[in-house]
């Protein structure tokens, strides 16, 4: 958990209505806290919108680190609000309820029920043991009850996994984290995004981002993968592996009923999976009863939604009407037979290869159109990477059927040309943005930009070369965090933080966490690093050179992939009295004159 991006314990929000008691979790799009409602002395969970890599904290305020990211931040913030509103409208005892939503500190917060317990993932991690099948028969109906409510409002969760199913101390289950969910309006248009997924828990329609094919069956696949992992402790097989054959490794203790259930829920074809919660409930009700649960209770919400059938009434036609109808029916039958005979003749005179090619044509055209749309809509390399994943299945279909229907199965080359054109355009946009960052001496963000492109284009030497060049200019050091400590005497350091008390301050000492960017081997970095500390009024308070406090000289040794924390700088101050004034300071770290990191800290 990265506490440097989070609000500190004791901070008050909403005019003093809530106080932060504890930091719970930090993710890519938000932070979660345990808070106390001061009026009622009750504990709740609070979620804060915070985009890692885009936001930075200025005291309690959340700001956007790069102005160009402002529009993206505002767009994602609105989706965060919609997530809270969706949760607020989902009244179910197995879904946490949202109680408050407000904006403060430049971002958004919502208050929800606090589940005093742990997720299935945490339970397995702490115990080192799988969840028993008996426990699963207790948990599963509760999760299905939550999903029944979610799906009834045309919402798909899209991120069901062991980490998103909580158990309280009584063993009751709760479905959490609707950040990836997608809702359809009456016209079936998307009102929220669902571009992210968890590998192993996403079916093929989600991996390929075929949003028009999302449905209850998409969540059931993820739930099946969850059941598989928590009972076997094996990572769920990919949707590709499933389509190529038996990819499960079930434990010998698992019943055949459970194996069949998981295989059904994880069918590669969405049409072969359960289509509704009721389908699953019908199947598992006998086993829930066998595990000591109430079959009647398991069926309760299934039966409440089953429409009552009405008794059909047959009408007896007059004789003459029946005769006329019989004549018409005979003519129609003869016509159908004639058409069928012609179709039969045409079909069976085709080669087996042609028939197979025609049968696969709809799938081929669908994938081609999806790939073309993905390329045209891509705004960055990560989205282009998603589009490229469709090349392989398209190539496979062309390899199989191009000889039979060459005029149909010939679109991949055109897609690749469109892709190359888009890559070239995006590479230029990335280069222009990186150049402007370098002009502002922001080498770290420029490196992040090129690294994203290099990861998405592993075969593109140009992007990798840019990364290597910037890594060298950064001293092959990627600084990931920096906190400060008061060094009282000798090497004795107080607890590092971004907020330090000035009264007993002696030597202010930065502690830097870094990750090596060396391309290979182990090396000694001999060049000097420098830093600057800027006063609240903007004037330079202090500067120094070399990480002497780390190695007692101006060099230190690092190894590829090493993560380390060192007291690089000896600090500055006075051994007998405080030389510091209260306020917010800026710390900047340089290598060969290039700024590779900056941070803000407060003296109070």
Image: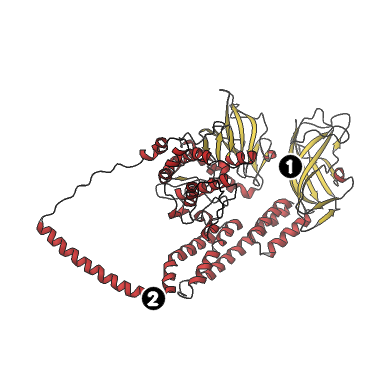
Mark 2 element type: loop
Residue 272 placement: quadrant: bottom left
Circle count? 2
Q: Residues within 10 Å of mark 2 (few under 14, many from 20)?
A: few
- Above or below residue 73? Residue 329 is below
Q: Is residue 25 visible?
A: yes
* Residue 480 spot, x, y in % from top left: 73, 46
Residue 384 placement: quadrant: bottom right
In the image, 526 versus 158, the foreground residue is: 158
Coloration of the structure image: secondary structure
Q: Quadrant of the N terminus?
A: top right
Mark 1 element type: strand
- Which residue is at a point 68% across and 61% down the rendered structure image? 463
Left or right for 366, reference 556: left
Q: Earlier in the sequence, mark 2 or mark 1?
A: 2
Q: Is label 2 or label 1 in front?
A: 2
Left or right for 604, reference 304: right
- Which residue is at a point 44% across and 70% down the rendered structure image? 357
* Residue 100 spot, x, y in % from top left: 53, 32
Real-space Cα separation, disc 2 to disc 1, in angstroms: 71 Å
- Above or below residue 219? Residue 138 is above
Q: Which mark is residue 599?
A: 1
Residue marked by disc 2: 350
Q: Is residue 175 visible?
A: no
Left or right for 203, reference 564: left
In the image, 463 versus 138, the foreground residue is: 138
- Which residue is at a point 58% across and 29% down the rendered structure image? 14
* Residue 126 spot, x, y in % from top left: 64, 38
* Residue 230 spot, x, y in % from top left: 57, 44
């Amino acid at each position: 958990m990265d506490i440097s991006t989070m609000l500190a314990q004791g901070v008050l929000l909403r005019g003093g209505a809530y106080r932060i008691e504890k930091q719970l979790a930090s993710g890519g799009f938000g932070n979660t806290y345990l808070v106390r409602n001061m009026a009622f002395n009750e504990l709740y969970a609070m979620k804060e919108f915070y985009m890692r890599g885009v936001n930075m904290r200025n005291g309690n305020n959340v700001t956007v680190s790069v102005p160009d990211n402002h529009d993206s931040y505002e767009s994602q913030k609105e989706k965060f609000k919609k997530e809270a509103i969706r949760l607020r409208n989902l009244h179910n005892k197995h879904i946490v309820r949202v109680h408050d939503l407000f904006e403060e500190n430049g971002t958004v917060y919502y208050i929800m029920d606090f589940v005093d317990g742990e997720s299935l993932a945490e339970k397995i991690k702490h115990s080192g043991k799988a969840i028993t099948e008996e426990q699963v028969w207790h948990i599963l109906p509760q999760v299905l009850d939550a999903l029944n409510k979610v799906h009834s409002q045309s919402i798909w969760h899209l991120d069901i996994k062991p980490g998103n199913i909580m158990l309280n101390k009584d063993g009751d289950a709760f479905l959490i984290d609707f950040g990836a969910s997608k809702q359809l309006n009456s016209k079936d248009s998307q009102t929220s995004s669902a571009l992210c997924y968890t590998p192993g828990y996403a079916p093929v329609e989600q991996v390929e981002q075929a949003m028009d094919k999302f449905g209850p069956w998409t969540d059931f696949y993820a739930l099946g993968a969850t059941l598989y992992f928590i009972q076997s402790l094996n990572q769920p097989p990919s949707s590709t592996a499933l389509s190529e054959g038996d990819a499960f490794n079930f434990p010998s203790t698992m019943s055949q009923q459970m194996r069949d259930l998981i295989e059904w829920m994880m069918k590669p074809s969405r049409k072969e999976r359960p289509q509704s919660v009721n389908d699953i409930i019908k199947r598992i009700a006998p086993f829930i009863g066998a595990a000591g649960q109430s079959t009647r209770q398991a069926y309760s919400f299934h039966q409440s939604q089953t429409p009552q059938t009405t008794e059909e009434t047959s009408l007896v036609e007059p004789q003459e009407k029946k005769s006329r109808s019989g004549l018409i029916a005979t003519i129609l039958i003869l016509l159908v037979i004639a058409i069928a005979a012609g179709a039969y003749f045409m079909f069976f005179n085709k080669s087996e290869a042609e028939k197979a090619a025609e049968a696969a044509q709809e799938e081929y055209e669908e994938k081609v159109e999806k790939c073309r749309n993905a390329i045209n809509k891509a705004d960055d390399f990560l989205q282009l990477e998603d589009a490229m994943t469709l090349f392989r299945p398209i190539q496979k279909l062309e390899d199989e059927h191009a000889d039979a229907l060459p005029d149909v199965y010939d679109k991949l080359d055109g897609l690749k040309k469109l892709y190359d054109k888009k890559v070239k355009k995006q590479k230029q946009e990335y280069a222009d943005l990186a150049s402007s960052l370098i002009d502002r001496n922001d080498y770290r963000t420029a490196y992040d930009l090129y690294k994203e492109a290099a990861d998405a284009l592993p075969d593109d030497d140009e992007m990798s070369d840019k990364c290597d060049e910037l890594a060298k200019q950064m001293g092959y050091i990627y600084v990931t965090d920096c906190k400060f400590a008061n060094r009282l005497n000798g090497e004795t350091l107080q607890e590092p933080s971004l907020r330090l008390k000035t009264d007993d301050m002696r030597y202010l000492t930065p502690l830097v966490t870094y990750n090596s960017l060396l391309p290979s081997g182990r090396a000694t970095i001999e060049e000097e690093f420098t830093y600057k500390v800027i006063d609240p009024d903007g004037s330079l308070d202090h500067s120094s050179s070399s990480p002497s406090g780390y190695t007692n000289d101006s060099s230190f040794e690092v190894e590829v992939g090493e993560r380390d924390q060192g007291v690089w700088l000896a600090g500055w101050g006075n051994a007998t009295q405080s030389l510091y004034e209260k306020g917010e300071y800026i710390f900047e770290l340089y290598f060969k004159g290039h700024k590779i990191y900056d941070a803000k800290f407060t003296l109070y």
